[in-house]
Amino acid sequence: MSSEITSLITFIESNFTGFSSMPGDSAAFILLIAFVVLAALEFSFPKRRLPVKQLRQSYQTNAGLFIFNSLIISASVTPLLMVADRYSGRGLLSYVEGSAWKALLSFLLLDLLLYCWHRISHSFDSLWMFHKVHHNDPYLNVSTAFRLHIVELLIITVLKSSYIVLLGVDKTMVLTNETLLTLFVMFHHSNISFRGEKRLGQAIIAPYLHRAHHSTERSEHDSNYGAVFSIWDRLFGTFTEREPLEIGIKNSSPQTVLGLVKFGFTPANPAPVPAYEPDLNVNAMIAEASSQSRKTCFYTWKISFATGWKRGVNRLVYGDRPGRRSQLYKSYMLAVSSISFIRNGKYHEIIERFCCSAYYPLYRRC
Ligand SMILES: [Zn+2]
């Protein structure tokens, strides 16, 4: 077993080192070729037949937005390379032995970072405002990968820069990661389908998984947040396999470059349908948690009565005004339900509940 792992590492090391020594020009060339190949595949074997005129408009707008963004933040990779040049070798990766492990770890963590960012972009109105620009393309195709609002791109660049500093990722690794990431993002936006796609979806975000993410239905687009690996969605309970009826966002929205830049600063309207409705299982868990909580409260009351500080303890637990729960009581309830959620493996429910209590009404899912 250990010899198999060693040979796998040697294989990755030899191949990865070769790939990571590529200059920026080669990376751009690879991406351009991949774009042309995917566009040709979409044209020859489309998953959905898209009207030619609208598809042309989508290509033009996405290319225009890419150029506009690149003019402001020079193609987004350059600032990352500058950060890497300055901070490489000083971060957490310096404790890891072997260049293959470093490369694998840096790519996996980058993918996890993007999963988290994507998920919170769907959770907070203030971030969805910019992210909805990416979702408003009604004709999903390879060029949709480049439909990003400049503010979102700036935030992503800051996040990636912090990750480079924290891990100490070097320049070649940054360039390789960015190239691979762009390849995967172009691939999952493509309007194609092929045999074995579902099997591939077990590990990688395949086009059919990302198509569900671009559904107009909130219940469907709040899933499959991954960029490269689908393991994060499986792990955090956001994985879905559905074929959406419609792509894009509800209500009409602009489809021109300047219209989209402006659209990003417009708050989401109308208010989204609340997606969070506890299912039967969750209700059972809450009931269990609150019964435990009641028992503990009764016990506290009994002790406090017996020892004579009933009023003080009651005020601490229930707050000053009758009928209103104190912050302590609410935190206690959250902690007790969290134990129940952990026991039942519903980790994401804890985050949902925490965000609902702490960030309501900013949090979209409440
Ligand atoms: Zn999204």
Image (cartoon, grey):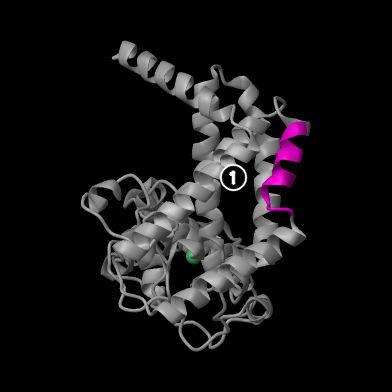
- Which residue is rendered at x = 37% and y = 20% of the image? 8
Q: Is 38 left or right of 305, judged from the image as shown?
A: left
Quadrant of res 150 = bottom right
Q: Is residue 81 magenta?
A: yes
Q: Which residues are magenta?
A: 74-85
> Is 275 in front, or is 331?
275
Quadrant of res 106 = top right
Quadrant (top left, top right, bottom left, bottom right) of the N terminus: top left
Q: Is 188 left or right of 309, judged from the image as shown?
A: left
- Label 1 SS: helix
Residue tagged 1: 28
Total residue callouts: 1
| Amino acid identity at mark 1 | Ala
Where residue 191 appears, x then y in whole percent? Answer: 36, 64
Magenta segment's dominant SS is helix
Where residue 169 appears, x then y in whole percent? Answer: 65, 32
Where residue 189 appears, x then y in whole percent? Answer: 43, 60
Where residue 198 appears, x then y in whole percent? Answer: 24, 53
> Is 277 in front, or is 303?
277
> Is 107 in front, or is 284?
107
Quadrant of res 26 = top right
Q: Is residue 223 magenta?
A: no
Residue 28 vertical placement versus 357 (above, below): above
Residue 322 vertical placement versus 205 (above, below): below
